[in-house]
Amino acid sequence: EAAVTQSPRNKVAVTGGKVTLSCNQTNNHNNMYWYRQDTGHGLRLIHYSYGAGSTEKGDIPDGYKASRPSQENFSLILELATPSQTSVYFCASGDLGANTGQLYFGEGSKLTVL
Amino acid sequence: AQSVDQPDAHVTLSEGASLELRCSYSYSAAPYLFWYVQYPGQSLQFLLKYITGDTVVKGTKGFEAEFRKSNSSFNLKKSPAHWSDSAKYFCALEGWGYQNFYFGKGTSLTVIP
């Protein structure tokens, strides 16, 4: 069974603080993604990666950095957290294309920035 | 530009009725289309996908979806609906060769027992 695990599951941070959300996958997928989910917006792509050492900007990258040090791990970094970044963040992995085309999601990380 | 539209933010129906959740997409090439479900407090789970071929695809939990190229739609269906189907449903499009997903805003379904 494909597995994606996120940590922490819940985080309360202060404005201006640094936050790191971590994601680990045991699927050996090349691609990994960070989304945020907000009411009225659905899922929006922040950053993604095609493999170890690569990171790409998604649709809403401002205020976020990403790091992919290995095939298994993909982190989302908020250097200076702001209240507008309060959200639920989902990590996903997948090898997209006609034969697979499925994303596997982690359980989500709820971030509250005060 | 790619986009996915789910025009109904909320749908409520009675158990035993037929459900149909609407999804339309905009994409210049042949799309790969998906439906995911999110139960309260949980993550997203894959339901089904359309890649090519048959216009009706079947997925897990008794769901199926019909792809209609003529009006760029990919509606999710199930009959009869069960109270346990209450969840949020997301339609998604994978851009061919782009390796990314575009999600609709989701439809929250409530099935009344």
Image (tube, coloured by chain):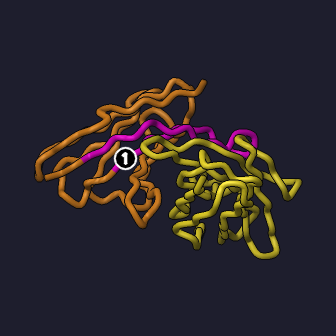
Chain colours: A orange, B yellow
Q: Which residue is mark 1?
A: A89
Name of the residue lying farthest toward the front: B113
- Can the viewer see residue B84 in this picture? yes
Q: Position of residue A12 (x, y in %)?
A: 18, 43
Total numbered labels placed on residues in the image: 1
User: From the viewer's perspective, is A85 left or right of B22?
Assistant: left
Specify start and end residues of the magenta stretch as a single range.
A88-111
What residue is drawn where x is 79% and y is 60%?
B66
Which quadrant holds residue A9?
A: top left
Local SS, label 1: strand
Vertical comparison of B78 with A19: above or below = below
For badge 1, the amino acid type reads Tyr
Tag 1: Cα neighbours inside 10 Å, few (<14), some, or many (≥20)? many
What residue is drawn where x is 31% and y is 53%?
A87
Along the line of sight, the residue nearer the viewer: B47 or B110? B110
Q: Position of residue A20 (x, y in %)?
A: 25, 38
What residue is drawn where x is 55% and y is 34%?
A30
Name the quarter where the N terminus of chain A is drawn.
top right
Q: Position of residue A75 (x, y in %)?
A: 34, 37
Along the line of sight, the residue nearer the viewer: B113 or A3? B113
